[in-house]
């Protein structure tokens, strides 16, 4: 029986040698190995993503700190230019005041009423300009105070920001190193698992894993393929439960396994020959 392994038939693969008495055990070992391999590959792909994203995360943290430092430097530049503007306005105000004083002195030297009125008008205009100038100087003073406060706040926060970033970077580095060690261990486990598989079965697995987003081996539940969720034909369902041949889904080609759910607890012999979902 069970000469029809690889029911999907389009893989061009030879069936497992099921002539020997322990065909079921052989299939069981192969399936267990495939499940472990798939778990290792899934963990490896997560670890690789984590390892690869780590430098980007470190860079983002360092960029954040640089931005913080740069914002502080920009604020200092802004303060300097605000103070410079204020000094320039101060100078302009002094000039206007000097002009007003001079014009007030000149009032007494004027001969005609028209000249007197014209001079008064000029003085009023200059005084209005002086008031505007004073308002602008006040604005600049308030602006400088605000900038100085933000610089003081940023300076006070800088050390804790640096500390915060370094702590996070250290944690990211430690996580990456742990992930690299775990990846190395998994890679050697993977090599061992692959070495324990018949070459054609590993090739089938690799092909399916690539095509099916890492899900090459799936559990059959209640007669349905756990990958494509299509119901298996009764014969395929029986085959996958009998554990005597390697069965693939006729719809999605994934390798199928079955975990018995209602095995009596006393029947240890039987239980141990079945693969568990969390191998
Ligand atoms: Zn399927």
Image: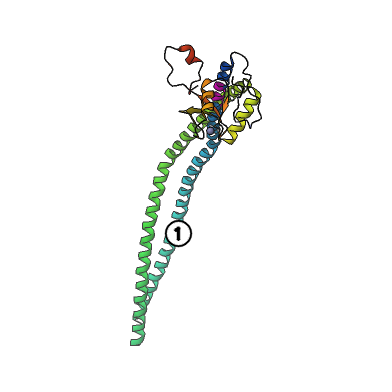
Secondary element type, mark 1: helix
Q: How many marks?
A: 1
Above or below, 80 relative to 67:
below
Q: Is residue 105 magenta?
A: no
Could you say which is closer to the camera, residue 30 or residue 170? 30
Left or right position of 114 against 238: left
Could you say which is closer to the camera, residue 2 or residue 109? 2
Query: Which quarter of the picture shows residue 206?
Result: top right
* Image quadrant where one finds the N terminus: top right
The part of the chain drawn in magenta is 31-37
Q: Position of residue 102 (x, y in %)?
A: 38, 75
Query: Which quarter of the picture shows residue 2?
Result: top right
Residue, x 52% and y 20% (percent of image)?
242
Query: Which quarter of the picture shows residue 91?
Result: bottom left
Ligand 1 within 8 Å of the CB at mark 1: no
Could you say which is closer to the camera, residue 140 or residue 270? 270
Residue, x 35% and y 72% (percent of image)?
128
Q: Position of residue 38 (x, y in %)?
A: 55, 27
Could you say which is closer to the camera, residue 153 or residue 133? 153
Residue for badge 1:
84
* Magenta span: chief secondary structure: helix
Residue, x 49% and y 28% (percent of image)?
220
Above or below, 85 relative to 45:
below
Q: Position of residue 230 (x, y in %)?
A: 50, 34
Q: Position of residue 68 (x, y in %)?
A: 46, 45
């Amino acid at each position: 029986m069970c000469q029809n392994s690889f029911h999907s038939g389009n893989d061009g693969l030879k069936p497992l040698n099921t002539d020997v008495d322990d065909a079921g055990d052989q299939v069981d070992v192969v399936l267990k190995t495939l499940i472990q391999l798939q778990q290792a590959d899934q963990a490896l792909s997560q670890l690789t993503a984590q390892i690869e994203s780590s430098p980007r995360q470190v860079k983002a943290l360092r960029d954040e700190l640089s931005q913080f430092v740069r914002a502080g430097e920009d604020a200092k530049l802004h303060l300097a230019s605000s103070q410079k503007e204020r000094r320039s306005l101060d100078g302009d105000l002094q000039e206007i005041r000097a002009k007003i004083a001079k014009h007030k002195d000149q009032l007494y030297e004027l001969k005609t009423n028209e000249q007197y009125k014209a001079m008064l008008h000029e003085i009023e205009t200059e005084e209005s300009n002086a008031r505007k100038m004073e308002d602008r100087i006040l604005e600049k003073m308030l602006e400088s105070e605000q900038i100085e406060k933000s610089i003081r706040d940023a300076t006070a926060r800088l050390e804790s920001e640096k500390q915060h970033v370094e702590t996070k970077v250290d944690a990211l580095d430690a996580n990456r190193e742990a992930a690299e060690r775990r990846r190395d261990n998994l890679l050697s486990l993977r090599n061992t698992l692959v070495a324990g598989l018949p070459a054609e079965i590993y090739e089938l697995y690799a092909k399916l894993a690539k095509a099916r987003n890492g899900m090459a081996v799936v559990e059959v539940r209640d007669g349905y393929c756990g990958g494509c969720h299509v119901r298996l034909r009764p014969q395929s369902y029986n085959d996958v439960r009998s554990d005597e041949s390697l069965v693939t889904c006729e719809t999605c080609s994934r390798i199928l396994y079955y975990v018995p759910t209602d095995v009596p607890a006393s029947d240890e012999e039987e239980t141990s020959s079945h693969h568990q979902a969390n191998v």
